[in-house]
Amino acid sequence: MLCSKTAFLSGRRFFSAFARNCGHENPLGLPKSGSPPQLPRMQRGLPQKRHLPNVKKVIAVSSAKGGVGKSTVAVNVALALQRLGKRTGLLDADIFGPSVPKLLNLSGEPMLSENNRLVPMSNYGIQSMSMGYLVGAEAPVVWRGLMVMKAMQQLLHEVEWDNLDVLVLDMPPGTGDIQLTITQQVVLDGAIIVSTPQDIALIDAIKGINMFRKVGVPITGMVQNMSIFICPNCSHHSHIFGAEGGRLTRECDRLGIDLLGDVPLHATICQDSDRGVPTVVADSEGSNARAYMDIAERVAKKIFT
Ligand SMILES: Nc1ncnc2c1ncn2[C@@H]1O[C@H](COP(=O)(O)OP(=O)(O)O)[C@@H](O)[C@H]1O
Ligand SMILES: [Mg+2]
Ligand SMILES: [Zn+2]
């Protein structure tokens, strides 16, 4: 009570206060009873692709597999694009496993704008929005089906981005419902596919590429993550997954896709992420940051020209 009163007095409104006033017990304003939310009639038919307000370009960072480094690529490429002078946002579309709050070292709940849209949270010069801000870092998201779609729509369409040149979407893993919903509802200017060099990851990456192609999203290119292991003790380089990276290059050639760059497997990349200071910020002139900058330069060249 005190909290919302203070918020009222200071003229600031938080998301949870809004949700309480609306008589809902969860922050997204979904129904209490667990009955599926009613979608407006228009949305029941074929979904319509929309441009996001105040956003010039949208690129998805995707991988069909989890754990290949998608979020790490997404946050570092977003920060790299910002260093290149683009006003950049990062939207965490991974509803079940949001990592943007941790990667950007942000917590707390977002405020609401005049017209009840979520105000992005910012750090290191980029704007961000994530399910993690709405439900808290450790609460599991246990909704299903339509509830998830409703949450997804709010994250996609009800954020008050402040005049972005580019929005980077950290996609959830897989090629299922959520991915399709996103690709069908938002005009995507490109997709970056992240893969590791192993066959199992590559096979899934190709599935991802085919999904984007099917829905008419241009593939910006592929990022090879963890191709080379750099020993933190002696800086020795080793191709722990074999193949000297040649397999992925050949696949890119075969599919007619650009290889946007390689990111080495390096202990500090993981440590930087874990403490919420991504490598492009933590060691901005280092070779790992350089790898992400190179990728961002290629991406910028492709989507802004
Ligand atoms: N190039 C890299 N070198 C070292 N660790 C990495 C690298 N890329 C990602 N990681 C680590 O691997 C784990 C999974 O990465 P993450 O970006 O969360 O994957 P995804 O989003 O695909 O599930 C994280 O702990 C991350 O810090
Ligand atoms: Mg992730
Ligand atoms: Zn060594």
Image (cartoon, grey):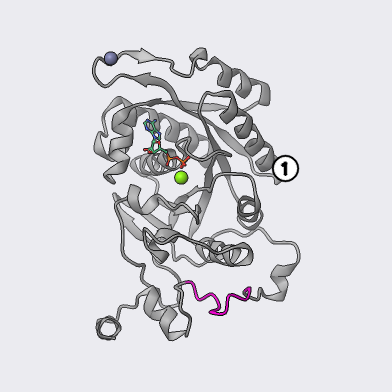
Q: Residue at x 50, y 28 (%)?
A: 196
Does residue 80 appear to the left or right of 142 in the view shown?
Answer: left
Q: Between residue 106 and residue 257, name the one nearer to us.
A: 106
Number of numbered markers: 1
In the image, is the residue at mark 1 within 8 Å of ligand 1 by its beta carbon?
Answer: no
Foreground residue among 228 and 298: 228
Magenta residue span? 28-36
Ligand 3 sits in quadrant: top left
Relative image position of residue 143 (x, y in whole percent): 55, 64
Q: Secondary structure at mark 1?
A: helix
Q: Quadrant of residue 10?
A: bottom left
Q: Quadrant of the N terminus?
A: bottom left
Residue 190 location (% of width, % of height)? 57, 42
- The residue that mark 1 highlights is 214
Magenta highlight: main SS: loop
- Report if residue 200 lies within the magenta region: no
- Quadrant assignment, res 288: top left
Q: Position of residue 134 (x, y in %)?
A: 41, 66
Q: Nearer the viewer, residue 71 or 198?
A: 198
Question: In the drawing, does residue 50 fall left or right of residue 71?
Answer: right
Magenta includes 30? yes
Where is 221 relative to 107, above or below?
above
Residue type at numbered disc 1: Lys
Q: Is residue 290 above or below residue 183?
A: above
Q: For the point 60% across and 44% down, which residue is it?
A: 174
- Mark 1, Cα crowd under 10 Å, few <14 / some 14-19 / many 20+, is few
How far across and how far down the image is residue 213, in percent? Answer: 69, 40
218 relative to 84 in the view: left or right? right
Q: Nearer the viewer, residue 189 or 60?
A: 60
- Residue beneath the point at 39% across and 14% down: 238
